[in-house]
Amino acid sequence: MAPEEGDQAMSHEDKAACSSLNTTSSTELFDGAPSSENERLRIRQAAVDAMHHGSPKIDPQIWTDVTSHLSGSTTIDARQRDIFFENLTVHGKGSSLQIQKTVLSALLYPIAYPVKRLMSIVGNKKPHNDRRTILHGFNGILNSGELLLVLGRPGSGCSTFLKSLCGYLEGLDLDPVSEIQYRGVPFRVMIEKYRGDLVYNQEADHHFPNLTVGQTLEFAAHARAPHNQVGNSSRDQYVKSVVKVVMDTFGLSHTYDTNVGNDFVPGVSGGERKRVRTDTIVGMNSIAETVLSRTSIAAWDNSTRGLDAATAVDFVRSLRTSAKLAGSCHAVAVYQASEGLYNTFDKVILLYEGREIYFGPRQGAVAYFETMGWKRPPQQVSADFLTAITNPGERQPQVGMENAVPRTPVEFESYWKNSPEHAELETSMRQYKMKTPLDSSEEIKLDEIKRLEQSNHARISSPYLLSVPMQIRLCIVRAWQRTRNDIPALIATAVAQTVVSLIIGSLFYNIPENTAGLGQRASVLFLAVLTNALISLLEITTLYSQRLIVEKQAAYAFVHPFTEAIAEVIVDFPIKLFRCLLSAIIVYFLANLRREASHFFIYIMFQLTAVMTMATIFRTLATVTRTIGQAMALAGVVIICIAVYTGFTVPQFDMPPWFGWIRWLNPIFYTFEGIVSNEFHGRHFECVEYIPSLSFEQGLSFTCSYVGSIAGERYVSGDAYIAGSYDYSYDHVWRNYGILVAFLVFFYVLYFWLTELIPGTTPAHEVLIFRHGGVLQRLVRGDLERGESIRLQEVKSLASEVHSSKAEQKNTFSWKGLSYDIPVKGGEKRLLDDVSGWVKPGSLTALMGVSGAGKTTLMNVLARRMTIGVVTGDMFVNGRELDASFARNIGYVQQQDLHVETCTIREALRFSAALRQPQSVSMEEKYNFVEEVIQLLGMQNFAEAVIGSPGDGLNMEQRKLLSIGVELAAKPQLLIFLDEPTSGLDSRSSWAICAFMRKLADHGQPVLATIHQPSAVLFEQFDRLLFLAKGGRTVYFGDIGKQARTVLEYLEDKGARHCGPTENPAEYMLEVIGGGTQGQSTSIDWVQAWKRSTEYNKLLGELDILASSPSNGVSADPYMVGEFAMPLLVQFYHVMKRDLQQYYRQPEYILAKFGAGVFCGVFIGFSFWKSDNSSQGFQNVLFSLFLLCTIFSTLVNQIMPKFLSRRTLYELRERPARTYSWKVFILCQILVELPWQTLLGICTWASFYFSVYGSGQSSQRQGLVLLFTVQFFIFASTFAQLVVAAVPSVVLGSMLATFTFLLCLLFNGTMQPPSALPRFWIFMNRVSPLTYYVGGISATALHGRPIHCSNRELRVFDPPQGQNCGQYLAEYLKTAQGTLSNPLSTDQCQYCPLRVADQYLAARDISWDDRWRNFGIFWVYIIFNVIGAVLLYYLFRVLPYIRRNRTQKSRN
């Protein structure tokens, strides 16, 4: 129904009610419900009608609040919960100090650990307890409708505290002495039965990228929609109405049909994506978490990170409104809280290294610590003062109280527990426990409300509102939406499978229906079933891509994880059916398989069931593992087992007893036997080769030269052939299909059960990792002897004196009329519009603006780091155009802290200094300067700490300090850019970094920094401000002034309201120009006001003066004018050293590589154990090489992510900074793999060679096979780099590598001899590098070995009456290739078709004489890979970068 129709259908009273809603002020909402009951009922009716009739013309924020409230006051009162916690103690696992692992330490661990334990027992020492206490005995009450501000420095336990309140205890251990209750409901009961009322909103966002924003939010609304909706409206009406209003409220209406997206899938912008979550609208300014998930208790972990000040305040105010109206309570951790934001809260808790040192009313927190004896500096906001109390380097005792105040966390805790405030808290807690005892009455109330809200057939003990069938139906809808929104991926997969099927079908094109095609039919069926099954390997990647999302939805009580699994299976079925049919039709009819309808559909049945079974197996593997690497490793084991024990490469009768049982657990074994029996049963194939030839025919004295032949018969029975070749029987077809279905059902049940049973991914907890020998001994004693977490010395003030080694700067950087346009669908979009300004020596310039104004974009443009689009305007250094050395003469601290994970802090700084400082500076001087930087940044105690990954290495603050240090170590000659250097840091760290920037500026260094949420004190550290509005347009550029009076007077002169004395100037500015959630309306065009101002004219005049008076501020050092500071050889030395070090320090990567190679070698070796000299034995040897090649895919998929992570670091940070050349990067990436690949080749050769070929061969043959094996592994690494050098993602690289490898594998002559290939494909046999690898090894190992046929391979027939076998076959044997086993026998002549292995090899165009030729040709392929990788990287990654830079320069 159209909105107009809805309006007409509403009564005058309803419209009046809506009008009253519109005019209801925020103050009224804070103060309580509407004044009269009649008014309340009219507002309720208006909300009901609005829900039925479409879009009401009322304020969406108020409408949302009221409709959420109108589900009934009784319901709301009953759902309201408090949080009571007493003696809250939480433990974590593992020491907080660790030593970095290396390849050597990992290899020695199986020996070192038992020795260490034995010495511990002998020395009567207690084993070290890895459990560490994170929270120590917290007490407090958070009542319904209250907001709690959680303060503490990073690492103090804020996140753990928030998780504990909401029951998110993965990786944590709640001490038994802890008591948590929710208004009479015990902790365990709450998280088991009412989990949906507890929400922990973590900092990271996880979404389905291919869902639209509207679909994402509608799913959340559906999952938590109460059965008794407002006004008894339908569920769909309720969901549509609520989602619409929520999106209107938070400025996301325009994104309803836009994909959420991610780094690889196009979608909404980063800021908009931050506002979207799978359950609701997120983080920054969103109450939609409460509206859609309808939670009673929510914990928000630094959700304001990255938001501008106005938006952050709007977000907390929305929580305030929700708490007041719905009675919900919220605990919010905020690292940088303005005074206005601080005053929004009811209570405050302050954490100091895991100890509670204050909990109570917000109004009394500051007074408590002032009474304790601490001094609050002027203009310091309350939150900053409280956080500073926990920093020994920042807090200041009052005069005369220096020796009276507590100092350590334990002393602060003791003071708190003996304080009157704590006594008052204890009294409140005792009264609370008496008032709300732990009994079943509150649980009964919640059950009653939940029964009203739950759908029919939902279990009352379940935390979910929907029944299982409704959850499945909802998940099916979403799975279908995701599939429909990702059509390109479906098409790509279908095209890839079609191409593979066309290749397999054409490889075996039109197989003859005689005995010449018997082996080909089995081969094509094997490849068809194997490739179809292995395509399911992608299921692992799919599951891991959505794992975090499903886990979070289960935590929010949206849907059971197993219902999502069932839905995906159902939605995937038609897709898998289509792909199976497509593949089957192509292969089946191209290869001329049995053209009978019944047999074709049996083939389809087996293939489809096998594909679904393998998909479920791989999903089960992904479910039981913790990382995708573990899942892929297990999948590699499954694949090799499947390939070897299908019954084709090793027939059943040749399977070794120690591994033969594997076939009974292999679904593909049953599938292959079924489709082979289905193809051959009841068919007779005309013989094309006889023994002896038919010219010798006499009665029954001849036979067909194929397995299964009968003397005197001119055809071979298909049943006899498969029985003799594979020990298969048609009688097993339906038995096998039944077993296959049983496998499918079993793995379905197992997968669904494990999905629900296995807990979510354990979050990482911050831990410092030190280089071996680099940790300070006192830290080891503190951590290992006392069992306490590491307590590093406080970082000293970053405002300490800058050393004189940093020369004073005299460079001015200016820009004029900068505009930046990027291509979009249908034209161009302008992100920056006519921006001008400068940064002068000795000045600290702030770049601010509303979210999405283009601050980071401008920073990238100024640093010349844009990758797309067109920049116009002028940029100068000292009035001169920018030259080639500009990029390396600036320091750019990016938002992302990108570093090599295995390096220590000192190594990272030395690397930067060694390659970015000029060649004229000695290495000793560079390293000495690095030590000064370490001292300056206060990193002495952890300079040898390994960078690691977030949560497993340096914390956020330490990473940001390192990022600053890396740029400072380069001694930038011009200026330093810092993009949001304080984002995510606490107020103390933010102040320290700003003070450090201030000191740099005071020493003459020009500094430009973007900043989001500066306090008034931080804001005063800056000299000048460049303020941007949306669209990248300038609002103001000029001095800030003391207490920001200059910029404030400018705004007030242009019509802005007066800024109050207690207001934060940054928040004020964002508010008056239209910042915040949706942008406040303003009648002033601030951009035009700026263009008409005298300040703007002064800016242009100053820029003209700078441009007309060029100076020589840049150093005249000749080494400073080139693109790079150091020559190529020096670059190569340092980069190669770092890369070799990185590999040595990542044992998990190296051992996974070696584990795969050695396991594959051992498994294949024992599966083909000392193959005999029969024809089947030689075929087994050839297949062993074929299967050994399958490790290629595993190796390539290991190498490519490694390459891409290094390429990301190089292209995002090191190349723009001109640290080293692209030639050095690509060459080092290729060379660093070679030592490990060589060693891997040796280990793999040793693990399979002697098992398969025995030890009796000459050393020359053994050595040549070793060389071929090493060559293969070197080829694998160079091939991986050839493929990944140009591609943007691992997924695309993996697809290309897998497809190319499949071509090489199929055409190497193992599955189909070159003579049997269609003419079109003969060239592929010669092009495939594996042709020369397989040919070289097999010729070397098998040359000259005699063939002794097994009884199954002998061709048996009777000679004519009166002749023995030798007499009868005398003439035939003169030209035949085979041998007669019993020439004197007068019956049962036994003829072996081949006499020597070279005959078998010749049929595949393999010759002993070509072994060294093959060795040389294989090297040619390796060299081609290296040259190709370098060339492709240059063409696709370097040349476009160079062209962009040239284009930007010409535009400027």
Image: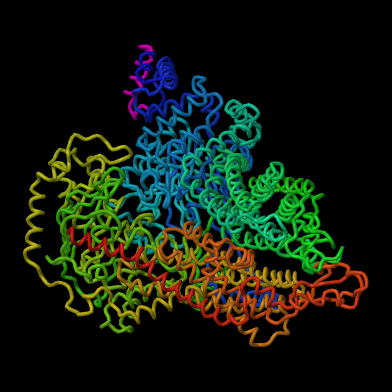
Question: Considering depth in this image, is 1216 or 672 the residue closer to the camera?
Answer: 672
In the depicted structure, whether residue 874 falls above or below residue 1265? above
Q: Quadrant of residue 1315?
A: bottom right
**Numbered-mark total:** 0
Residue 335 on image: x %, y %: 39, 52
Q: Residue furthest front?
A: 695
Magenta stretch: includes residue 19: yes
Question: Considering depth in this image, is 1192 or 1058 the residue closer to the camera?
Answer: 1192
In the picture, which quadrant includes the N terminus?
top left
Question: Considering depth in this image, is 1335 or 343 the residue closer to the camera?
Answer: 1335
Q: Is residue 1133 left or right of residue 487?
A: left
Q: Is residue 102 left or right of residue 1022?
A: right
Can see residue 497?
yes
Q: Is residue 406 left or right of residue 1370?
A: left
Can see residue 420?
no
Magenta stretch: includes residue 1378: no
Q: Quadrant of residue 569?
A: top right
In the picture, which quadrant includes the C terminus?
bottom left
Residue 572 on image: x %, y %: 58, 42
Q: Which segment is the magenta one?
A: 10-28
Image point (15%, 41%), residue name: 1052
Residue 1153 on image: x %, y %: 58, 70
Q: Residue furthest top?
A: 12
Residue 704 on image: x %, y %: 78, 63
- From the image, give the main secondary structure of the stretch colored magenta: helix
Question: Considering depth in this image, is 1263 or 14 the residue closer to the camera?
Answer: 1263
Colouring mode (rainbow / by chain / secondary structure / one colour): rainbow
